[in-house]
Amino acid sequence: MDQDRRSFLGHAGKLLVLTASAAVAWEHVLEGRPEEAPNYRVSDHWWGMAIDIDKCIGCGTCVRACKKENDVPLEPFTFRTWVERYVVDPEDIDHPQVDSVNGGYQGFYDRELLDPRLKMFYVPKLCNQCAHSPCVQVCPVGATFESPDGVVLVDTSYCLGCRYCVQACPYGCRFIDPRTSTVDKCSLCYHRITRGLTTACCETCPTGARVLADLKDPKDPIHAFLREHRVQVLKPQMATGSKTYYNGLDGSVR
Amino acid sequence: MKRAPGDYVHLVKMAGLFAVGVLAFVIVRWVMVPADFGVYGHYRAGALKDNMTRPLVYAGQASCVGCHPDVAEVRAKGRHAHVACESCHGALGTHAGNPDGIKPARPDRRTTCIICHTASIAKPKSFPQVVPSEHAPDGTCADCHPVHNPKLS
Amino acid sequence: MPGVEGFIYPNEFELQWGILIVLYPFITGLVAGAFILASLERVFNVEAVKPTYRLALLTALAFLLVAPLPLQLHLGHPERSFEMYLTPHTQSAMAMFGFVYLWYLMAVLVLEIWLDYRRDIVLRWRASKGISKVVYGAMALWSGNIGPSALELDDRVGRALTVIGIPSAFLLHGYVGFIFGSVKANPWWSTPLMPIVFLFSAIVSGIACILLLYFATCWARRVTVDMRCVDTIAKYLYYAFLVDFTLETLDLVHRLYESDESFHALDFMVKTRLFTSQIVLQILVGTLVPIGLLALTQLFTLRDKARRVIYVLAGGLTLVGIFAMRWNVVIGGQLFSKSFLGYTTYKMQFATREGLLPAVGLLILPFVVLWVLVRLLPPWGEGESAAGGDVAG
């Protein structure tokens, strides 16, 4: 009896809190008046992302969710986030076979059961939200910048479309939106994370392979993630200060 | 060679022209640079706000659970506990904003599941996966696996 | 995907910088090279090249005026390009280049041309009527003092300007090299040698261009070519070329030797997609053949006519080679994926904003501008230059 009451109260309490926070977040949407969410202090946060390769199943749900959430053009091949599939001969990691058909938008279904000698895994990629970003460095006018809370953003009303930043990004995460002729890239769903929600890709990832990380929050699971796993970033030799941390990143990943 | 003041006139005029040019540049700059430029860094502070004010397309789990606690309870007991509602149901932002007016379509009870559960050597061994053509090819997954808590009934 | 081989990051399906961005370093290179040739006479007192002094300055101006146009055509929002002057990001080479360009145009080139031509401008101001009189008057800033002391003052200031102008010209084109050379994400571009290689190839192309223009204008005016002048120009072309070739070979040898992660991807690219433009056009036809031809004239005594033919041929091939070099840097740097696992192709269009047609137009435009400048401020004939020397004729 006590157990049931306790668990009921527990559930009810959780739901109450969740409903309240959801309600607050929605107020701003329903008001139709886009505004900074209250209770968001920029200096309280330092955003990044944790990606666990061991959990990624290559379903492509994150790619679809991102395109939907952020109005990314479906044609041509431009992606704020995408998934790559690696097929690696363990004795020859310098020559992986990689593909990313339509960025993984439809998932990867054409190679189901393969030679068991090979290693195969999926690598989701996005803007690494670099702390020493080369793309921010080269922008001639200040149309791309790192926000005080660590997100690299684009000012689309100021961007000239010179494409220097696209050249400077080592990870290939930037592209030109053909509709606006300005640059676009993953914004870590800034409009969501500043309202207490998580990014579209992390929200819909069914296995929890992608998790938003707030490095300034002592209660954030990122700290345990970084401590308990062998973590890497992409292209560490570029010293970009990447804040996208991968667990299980193989040496063959480019 | 002796120089008279008259020898310098054209140079003074050219220097004056340059000065006027610099002044014009300074004035144009003062007028045209956005007022909020440089507040936080070398960018327009308003751009932060621009990035914050995009519309929300996905509602986020918290909204779903708020109105559908019963489904959440069922889900919490099974292996889909950590699968967000919108992973399978798609973007529900409009529905959450207008729950009675906008009803989302039901996800297909086979193709939705196949997206994640198709067998592949790339997937972790512990992840439940089947070869769709060999696993109940004529039925829907939901025939045996209840969608929210997929434990075989 | 058509034209793609291997794996490229999904966003790399199209090249970011096309033929217009190839044109831009080519044009600014000609500016820097032409100016340096002109400064040979002014600062280093190489008398022999005096016949080309004014022509070189006007050519530099004509090309400098056209230089921003390919960039404007390329930008997604050319109407916002002035933002580079309003809020330049001091860490961005591209932004700082806007000021280098402005400095060079206004404080160096325009001033120097003005000071050198001032006497002729004033004389024309006095002699002309109507619109011409207004134009020349404005150019003279309505100051008519062309007495000996005023002209001597002009000469001194002009000389000082040229002294400042030489490092400014180095900066002008070295900066363009730095814009590429500082991109660590791209191993084809990222090398400290890039600004220097760009600069020396600029000098080579500028000298070759003036050489050809000199021949062309002499032919058009039915005037005999000053052999001492062209022999000297060719000599400087030869030496500049040797330095340029050495630098580019050094870069190549260094890459081959270190053979780092990117090398295999780049090596494959050069042997396949870039073979015609790099091996054939840039190295063989555009560098080794002209160097060989010029070496002939330096090592053997040849008749005037033979030398003239060789100079024209070498000059033309040089320009082809330097253009190919720009192509190989800009386009070549984007043909391979940053994953080093794949390649794409450049699909140049024809009549679009960034296509071949506007590129050809922009290559022709500087000569049209030059023609206007030559009409306005003839580099030869009637007057003597402020420096008091002869003009060949």
Image: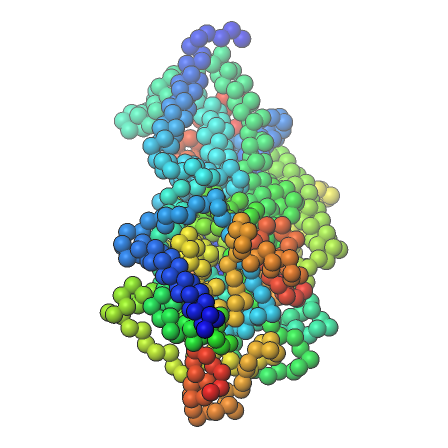
What residue do we see at 28% from left, 51% from top?
A33
Q: Is residue C73 visible?
A: no
Q: Position of residue B72 (x, y in %)?
A: 41, 72
The image quadrant of residue B124 is bottom right
Q: Residue at x 57, y 57 (%)?
A: A222
Total count of labels: 0
Residue found at the far left of this picture? B101
Quadrant of the rendered image containing residue A94 = bottom right
Image coords of residue A80 (percent x, y): 46, 61
Q: Quadrant of the C terminus of chain A?
A: bottom right
At 35% from the left and 52% from the top, the residue drawn is: B53
In the rendered view, would you say C60 is above or below B53? above
- Residue C213 image offset from top left, x and y in percent: 51, 41
Residue A95 placement, left or right of C60: right
Task: Give the farthest residue toward the right.
Answer: C257
> Image quadrant for the N terminus of chain A?
bottom left
A21 and C224: which is toward the camera: A21
C126 vs C180: above or below: above
- In this view of the protein, can residue A246 be seen by the observer? yes
Name the one closer to the observer, B139 or B96.
B96
Horizontally, is A99 left or right of B73 in the view? right
Image x and y of residue C342, in percent: 59, 66
